[in-house]
Image (tube, rainbow, N blue to C red):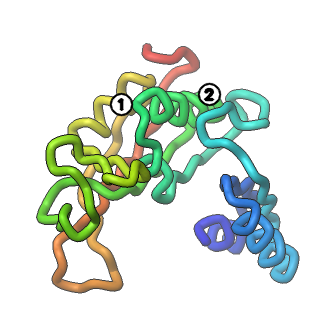
């Protein structure tokens, strides 16, 4: 959805998903709308199939919290960082364990903050910032995002805006 909105504003978008069904639907939507959106199936823990340093913007729309293994989360951020040109930006929004989220309702272990079925890991904002910085990102913003469909309910997603500030990882 974000790709379509940005394409309507003149951006050329590569859109990735691990689901062939989601990618097929995105391709149909892009074709029907005649917008420059190019969806493809990709593993978010592998480097993007683009020339390193050529991407202006990476959007993580609730991917990172589905990566339970710390090495997978690190690989995901490395892939995004390497794809971005120096000065490029990553916007990330993901579920967080903060501010009143009902862990029992989501069947998430309160000690590990990992879903008991192994599909989600809910980090704190502090952990998110550390992981982004460890990859080499400069944090421009970190906060909680309210769910627009649930007015008055505590935010359950963390937003991060980070910039690749140099051509060298971690510097």
Residue shown at 34%/37% (left/top)? Answer: 139
Residue 88 percent coordinates (x, y): 56, 38
Disc 2 residue crowd, few under 14, some 14–19, many 20+, Cα 10 Å: many
> Residue 82, labelled with which disc?
2
Residue 112 percent coordinates (x, y): 22, 41
Looking at the rendering, in which quadrant would you find the C terminus? Answer: top left
Q: Which residue is mark 1?
A: 131
Q: First in sequence: mark 2 or mark 1? A: 2
The answer to whether 8 appears left or right of 59 in the picture is right
The relative height of residue 134 versus residue 161 in the rendered view (above or below) is above
Query: Could you tell me how far apart the alpha carbons at marks 2 and 1 are, in whole angstroms?
Result: 15 Å
Residue shown at 58%/47% (left/top)? Answer: 58
The answer to whether 113 appears left or right of 4 in the picture is left
Looking at the rendering, in which quadrant would you find the N terminus? Answer: bottom right
Residue shown at 16%/50% (left/top)? Answer: 110
As helix, strand or loop, the secondary structure at mark 2 comes to helix
Residue 159 percent coordinates (x, y): 34, 55
As helix, strand or loop, the secondary structure at mark 1 comes to helix
> Residue 35, labelled with which disc?
none
């Amino acid at each position: 959805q974000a790709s379509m909105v940005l394409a309507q504003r003149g951006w050329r978008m590569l859109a990735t998903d691990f689901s062939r069904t989601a990618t097929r639907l995105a391709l149909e939507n892009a074709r029907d709308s005649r917008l420059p959106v190019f969806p493809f199936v990709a593993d978010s823990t592998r480097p993007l199939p683009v020339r390193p340093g050529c991407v202006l913007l990476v959007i993580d729309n609730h991917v990172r919290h589905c990566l339970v293994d710390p090495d997978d989360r690190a690989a995901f951020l490395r892939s995004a960082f390497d794809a971005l040109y120096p000065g490029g930006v990553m916007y990330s929004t993901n579920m967080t364990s903060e501010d009143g989220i009902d862990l029992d309702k989501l069947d998430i272990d309160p000690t590990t903050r990992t879903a008991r079925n192994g599909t989600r890991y809910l980090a704190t904002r502090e952990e998110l910032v550390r992981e982004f910085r460890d990859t080499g990102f400069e944090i421009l913003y970190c906060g909680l995002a309210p769910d627009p469909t649930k007015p008055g309910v505590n935010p359950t997603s963390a937003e991060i805006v980070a910039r690749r500030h140099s051509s060298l990882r971690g510097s």
